[in-house]
Image (cartoon, helix red, strand yellow):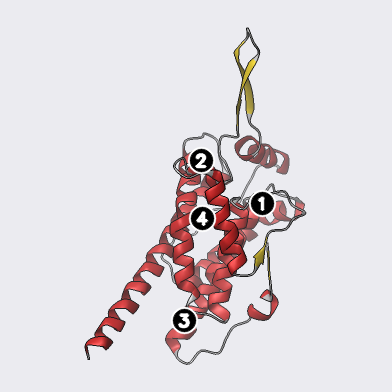
Amino acid sequence: MAAHGEGEESGSAVASDDVSDEIEVEAGARGAVYALLARLFTEADEELYAALSGGGVTDECARLLERTGLDVDPPDLTVEEERETLSARYNDLFVVGYSEVVDRTDGTVHNEGPPVSLYESGYRPNVSWNDVNLDLARAYEYFGCQVDEDVRRNHDHLRLELEFMGYLCRREAAVDPDVAAARLDFHDRHLRPFAEGIADALASETGTGLYGRLGDFLDRFTAADVDDLAARREAAETDASRGERR
C-alpha cells in the first residue's frame, strides 16, 4: 500500500509541550509495530527467516513496544524450525484449502478455504463482502492510500489493513494528531474484530507455532491500542465539557 506524500510526512514534528512529544513518539512506535506485523503475516523469505531465527525480530518488537506507551507483554517471535517447515506451516494455515466430494452421484464438490483466513470478510458473517471492501476502499482513498495493483489482494486482506493502520499512526505522529479519532474508528469498524477473529481461529488449530503467538500478540496489541485511544477521546471530551461550563 502506498500513500501520497508519505515520505514528507514520516518525520517527527516539533511539539509544543512534553505531552505532545510523548504522544507523537508513541504513535510513531505503534505505527512501526503495525508495519512489523504486516511483514510477519507473510511467508518468510530468506531475509525475514534470518531475522526470525536469529532473534532479531523478537528484539525489535520488544524495543518498539517500550516506546508505544502500551502495557503489552512482548511476544516471542523467534523460530527454531527450518525455513521450509515454517513455510509449510504458513501455507497449511493461511493458503491451502481442500475439496471434498459430497455427492458422488452427480460429482458435487464442497470447496473449503484455508483454516485461517487472512481476509476480514471471513470473520464478518453478518456483513457482505462487498460492504466490507467498499468501506475499506473509501477509507484508503480518503487518506490518499492506494492498493498495489501488481499484487492481487482484496482491500480486506490483513496485510493491507495493518499497513493502513501503520500509515495512520505515522500520520498522527508527524502532522495530524486528530487522526487518532480515525484510527479508533478504523479499529471499531474493521481491524479490531478482524484481529479477534484471526486470534480465535489460530487458537482452535494445533501446531501453529510462530503464527499462533503472532495472532495472540496481534489481538493483545490492537486491544491495548483501542483502550488507549478510547481513554484519550473520553478525556478530551471531558475537558471540552468542562471548558464549556466555565
Query: CA gap, disc 4 to disc 1?
Result: 14 Å
The residue beneath circle 3 is: 22
For label 2, the crowd category at 10 Å Cα-Cα, with few meaning under 14, some 14 to 19 and many 20 or more, is many
Please provide percent x and percent y for residue 165. 55, 64
The type of residue carrying mark 3 is Glu
Residue 75's tag is 4
Query: CA gap, disc 2 to disc 1?
Result: 21 Å
Q: Quick one: SS at disc 3?
A: helix
Q: Residue furthest left?
A: 245
The type of residue carrying mark 1 is Ser
Residue pictured at 72% horizontal, 58% vertical: 148
The type of residue carrying mark 2 is Leu
What quarter of the picture does the N terminus occupy?
A: bottom right
The residue beneath circle 1 is: 53
Which of disc 3 and disc 2 is earlier in sequence? 3
Q: Quick one: SS at disc 1?
A: helix
Residue 11 found in image quarter: bottom right
Which of disc 2 and disc 4 is earlier in sequence? 4
Regarding residue 90, the answer to whether it shows in the image is yes
Query: Nearer the viewer's eye, disc 2 or disc 1?
Result: 2
